[in-house]
Amino acid sequence: EVQVVESGGGQVEPGGSLTLSCAASGFTFSTSAMKWVRHVPGKELQLVSIINARGDHPYYAPSVKDRFTISRDNTGNTLYLQLNNLTTEDTAKYYCALLADSPRGQGTQVTVSS
């Protein structure tokens, strides 16, 4: 069974940084493209970033490009998202998932406020 556990969220001031982690199990992580998405209550799920199995040629949503960095550790079955220069617009619950899958985990809350 596919399982993912997101962590690393928290509350930061505008301009701050966070590193999100996603521990994956129940599937062959090293050959699976992955994504990060985020959700704000009352709004649609937003795709944030995609990474292929090799970890190259990532995709970023225009709103996070040049501020967020996706990466992965195929040995440790862990996906990461480095969030820099955060703004209040980045406040959301963040989820990781297989590229073609819907979020299954509990997500991790990121709150950006002063």
Image: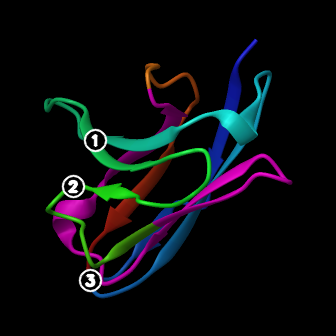
Q: Residue 107 at what x, y percent from top left?
A: 52, 39
- Magenta stretch contains residue 5: no
Mark 1 Cα shell of 10 Å, populated few (<14), some (14-19), many (≥20): some
Q: What's the CA distance linking mark 1 and mark 2?
A: 7 Å
Identified by mark 2, the residue type is: Ala
Q: What's the CA distance linking mark 3 and mark 1?
A: 21 Å
Tag 3 secondary structure: loop
Q: Relative to residue 92, is residue 46 depicted above or below?
A: above
State if disc 2 and disc 1 touch (CB < 8 Å): yes
* Quarter assignment of residue 112: bottom left
Lower position in the chain sequence, tag 3 or tag 1:
3
Identified by mark 1, the residue type is: Leu
Q: As rendered, which of 50 and 15 lies closer to the eye?
A: 50
- Residue designated by label 2: 61
Quadrant assignment for the C terminus: bottom left
Tag 2 secondary structure: loop
Q: Which residues are magenta?
A: 70-99
- Residue designated by label 1: 47
Q: Relative to residue 111, is residue 7 depicted above or below?
A: above
Q: As rendered, which of 15 and 22 lies closer to the eye?
A: 22
Residue occupying image coordinates x 24% and y 66%: 64
- Residue designated by label 3: 14
Q: Relative to residue 80, is residue 95 depicted above or below?
A: above
